[in-house]
Amino acid sequence: MSATDVEQVQTGEQVLPFYIVCDESASMAYNGGIDAINNGLPDLHASIASDPLVNDKSRICLISFSDDAEVLCPLAPASDIDALPGVMEKGATSFSAAFRLLKTQIAQDIAMLRADGFQVFRPAVFFISDGEPTDLNWQDSHRELTDKSLNPHAPNIIAFGVDRADADTIRRVGTIAAFLAEQDVNPGNALKEIMRALTNSIVQSSSSSNPTLIIPPAPDGTISLPLDVMDET
Amino acid sequence: MATNFEDMGTYTSSDSKGLNAGRVTLVLGAAGVVGGLLGFGLGEIQISESGSRFFGDSVNASSAVYFALVLLGVGAALVASQGISERNAQKAWATVLRSLPAILVGGAVAGFVAQILYTEMLNADEIDIAIRLCNRQGDYSCTAVDNLVRPARAIGWMIAGGLSGLALGVGFQSKKRMQNGVLGGAVGGLVGGLLFDSVNNIIGSGSAQPSRLVALLLIGALMGALIGLVDTLRTDMWLTVTSGEMTGQQFIIYDETTTVGCARNIPITILADRDVAEHHISIRRTGGSTTFECLPTASPITVNGSASSSGSLSNGDIIKIGNTEIRVGERTSSSPGTASSATTRQAHVDTSSRPDLYSHSPESETPAGAAPPPPRRNQPSAAPKKRPTIQMKPETDN
């Protein structure tokens, strides 16, 4: 099955949900990550909303995490979004909080989309972090999210790491792709490139009547990491 | 032994901006009492009905064993007190183990030397005359003998106290704490030694054991309290934790270089904050100025709200390491704890190693290659404290 396999065959219009999950731990403030993400969101919105086909085929959700995780912007077509809360400096880096919220949120969103008659493609998650997780058991919640035997709505995760992010951690988070900013690249600038790559990926993935997740090439200033385990179920 | 001594923090809780010297002295004094109790118990191993259990045929060697055992208790308690007060058992054990050889050797040397001095200083004829006089007068407490013995005993305990204090500094690998320990321990031992025979007379028991117990409790308390007093009198700088689980905890900055982090074996251990790296910052005091530097792999800290990887520190500065806020206290001519220069100096943003990869980005507002002007200390953090609202660009019609 491809990376964008259909969760359930239905007769309605096809949509591909995208979840942008941003680390807003304290370190994101000093390395320019907060500004880079907040500055990149309007461009991402404009790129999607300006193309009717992309807008129709995609749904965007913004989630942030630090000590806990929260949905900043519920899943919606970009054109329905007039404004959204930006990311801000907060506390620690709890991956578990992000993965747990993702699991419940994706399940709710898929149920809602199906109730509205949509044919839902497997969600894609863009996971962005600048550091090591501060919770020890994040791999348990990651497995509960991504293991298709445990979660029928397991999303495809593309992970991006900048600044102090550890390559091994990032490649374990990503299920279909993982990228790590090079050490000598300014984290804020790397995140700008990541936001561009992410925007291009959403636009390209949703620009056909049959949406297919397009994995972006390594953004400038990052390297592609070999994945720990390639999920092919 | 490490050649580059690092200073170790010490322990007390205080809500005030200044260093709580009384609490430092009290904690070490209390540790000394516990140490005296331990020392008494250990010292009794050496004492048997027939004299000394080990090396009974050599008064000098026998005394060396006794002092080594007594100072093992006193020294271990003093050394462990910091880790215990920080609820850091690993640090307590590590410092005790590190100081153990110094305590044992110091105790043995002190006992040996003290006994030689004691013997040399005492005039057997004078003592014999004093005892005969006491017996004739029915003065069985015989203070005259005490007065003859007292200086020798006091000097013996002064040496023992000084060496025990030295061991304390060895345990913490701190040169300044060695100095403080020698000074405080010697004075504490001297005073305790002077009072030793008086205690014996006051207790007046048929057995010498209760007298030894009380005397050792007193000596331990005096050694601890005076080491604490010297510590605080010679302190120029300290840190007070003002947020998180360790709120109120104070750490004295002793020597030239101090490491702060979450590791259990470093001078200042910040617990219960997962954003604090094992070795997060190094504080260096040279020539009256204090600077800090974030250590490799550690994230920058904020100083008065501005993120920085290195810079200077002074009285009243609030630094945030991970999620833990710490106030810098410095002994100045003015009252301690005031933010005297917090708003006048600059922290330095570390962007030196970042190439200007994407500086062409017109919307660039983040550091890109060329370092931005370092933020003023009193500037708010670049990060918003309130979640911003991002307005989306106007949607383009088809």
Image: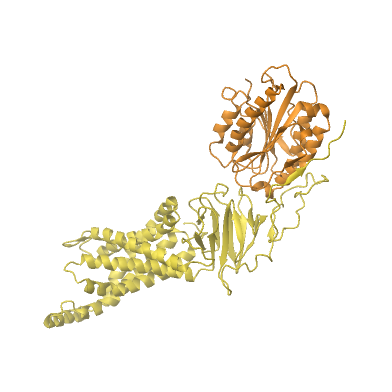
Chain colours: A orange, B yellow
Residue at 61 percent of width and 34 percent of height? A101
Q: A188 or B149: nearer the eye? A: A188
Q: A29 or A232: nearer the eye? A: A29
Horizontal relation, residue B322 to residue B197: left or right: right
Horizontal relation, residue B207 to residue B391: left or right: left
Residue at 44 percent of width and 62 percent of height? B169
- Visible in this render: residue A190? no
Farthest-out residue, right: B398
> Relative to residue B186, is residue A146 depicted above or below?
above
Horizontal relation, residue A142 to residue B10: left or right: right
- Residue A18 location in percent, x, y? 71, 30
Farthest-out residue, front: A116
- The image quadrant of residue B120 is bottom left
Residue at 57 percent of width and 61 percent of height? B327
- Residue B52 location in percent, x, y? 21, 62
- Residue B279 location in percent, x, y? 56, 51
Residue at 58 percent of width and 75 percent of height? B333
